[in-house]
Amino acid sequence: MRSIKLTLNGTPITREVEDSRLLVEFLREDLKLTGTKESCGVGVCGACTVLLDGKPVSACLALAVHADGCAVTTIEGIAEGDRLHPLQEAFLAHGGFQCGICTPGQILAAKALLDAKPHPTRAEIQDWMMGNLCRCTGYYKIIESIAAAAGAE
Amino acid sequence: MIPFTYLEPASLDEALALLAQHGEAAKLIAGGTGLVNLMKQRLARPAFVIGLRALKPLAGISADGALKIGALATLQSLATSAAVRQAAPLLAEACGHVATVRVRSMATLGGAMAHADPNLDTPPALIALDAQIVARSKRGERRIPVDRLFTGYYQTVLEPDEIVTEIAIPAQPAGSGTAFLKFLPATQDDYATVSVAARLALDGNGAIRDARVALGAAAMVPVRAAAVEAALAGKAADDKTFAAAAALVLGAIDPIADFRGSADYKRKMAVVHVRRALAAAAAKAKRPA
């Protein structure tokens, strides 16, 4: 076991974790933040995308101990109280999801893009989002939602 | 996940001491995109995992004609680095082709070298750039040309007590042009069906003064195609030369059949993509004045 200190969705926390705990297990099972989904488990699908110091990572490949000293952002942390994040609003307004399993990862990946580049081109959005799979194949609406959020900001 | 004890040294000396102490029972972890998957598949079962992330000096990039890249520099930082784009655009391009932005944000260049998966995009680029890795152990430091680093599938000449600390790319031949082609018939985030990195330098008459050609996903190790390079030396940089030289790549590769294509298909695609990479590199090369 190791003691780790991190800033989780803006709140500093300290927790004991197993050395071999994965970040996705730590978030979902230890902290009960089940908004982060695990799907492929090998870093390919993007469902478990969270932000580590603002950068998008696969929580299924990251060790929980590697969150020590870092800021972790999950889907639970991007709304401000009852006010949804502009990306969440845009996904609602533009139908950017179908079954919804990939949606937390899609939104976190998109947030990383817009935080780094507030007004990306459609090609840049497509290139950045390429690694977040939607098995309902709702890609057009996802890209549309992100483009709308970027335009609105 | 298999259980292991995680150790996080605060300095390189401490990391080298831990590695010397635990030897084969330990594995180094940087971004984790390689090792975590190997541990999930039980292909690696280290008792100790030594995390390198606290070794901040190993993440730097410095340029003075030559490039010195700290082993912990992420592929995303290299793909977007102005210094790398200027001094070695081939490496920036290859890094930008790796998987997805998530993987690129986690994976490091030193990690890619030590992981030694022959399907990776960065080894052929580094071979074509005449890069060397710097390996440190308690016993000292040595430099290993990247084209002599790999010995087999996930295997290198690195000893269990050595850490890759730096990737050194020398100043490139004046006016040389480079190209990286990654053949992706399925999805953009896939491993290459075959990848080719090429570097060509021309003389004042437009003849080829110097050539480097390396391939990924074409054999058990990243491959340098020395016969192709030899066939280019001194020849006119034209389509006839490129086609004749590209055919010689068949002697250097031994691809395996998988869902990305049969071995025969990959051999044919290797020839096509070597030819195209040479033409693309020549188009970017400048004749000396």
Image (tube, rainbow, N blue to C red):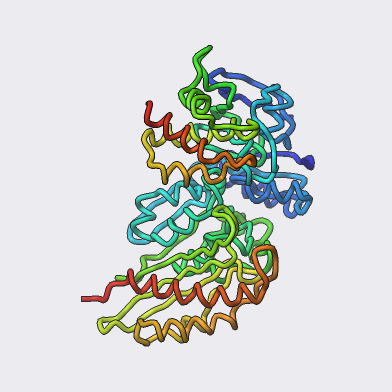
Front-lying residue, A127 or B126: A127
Seen as rendered, the residue at the extreme left is B289
- Identify the residue shown where x is 67% and y is 32%: A37
Is B137 displayed left or right of B127 in the figure? right
Tell me which corner region of the image, top left, top right, bottom left or bottom right, holds residue A58.
top right
Front-lying residue, B70 or B175: B175
Q: Is residue B65 above or below residue A42?
A: below
Front-lying residue, B35 or A55: A55
Tell me which corner region of the image, top left, top right, bottom left or bottom right, holds residue A101.
top right
> Residue A18 in the image: x percent, y percent?
74, 31
Is A89 displayed left or right of B193 in the figure? left
Q: Is residue A67 above or below residue B167?
A: above
Tell me which corner region of the image, top left, top right, bottom left or bottom right, holds residue B283.
bottom left
Front-lying residue, B83 or A86: A86
- Identify the residue shown where x is 68% and y is 68%: B152
Q: Confirm whether residue B140 shows in the render.
A: no
> Residue B139 in the image: x percent, y percent?
61, 59
> Residue B53 in the image: x percent, y percent?
57, 41
- Identify the residue shown where x is 56% and y is 42%: B11
Quarter of the rendering occupied by the N terminus of chain A? top right
> Residue B39 in the image: x percent, y percent?
74, 48
Q: Confirm whether residue B38 shows in the render.
A: yes
Quarter of the rendering occupied by the C terminus of chain A? top left
- Identify the residue shown where x is 67% and y is 74%: B263
Count up the numbered dots.
0
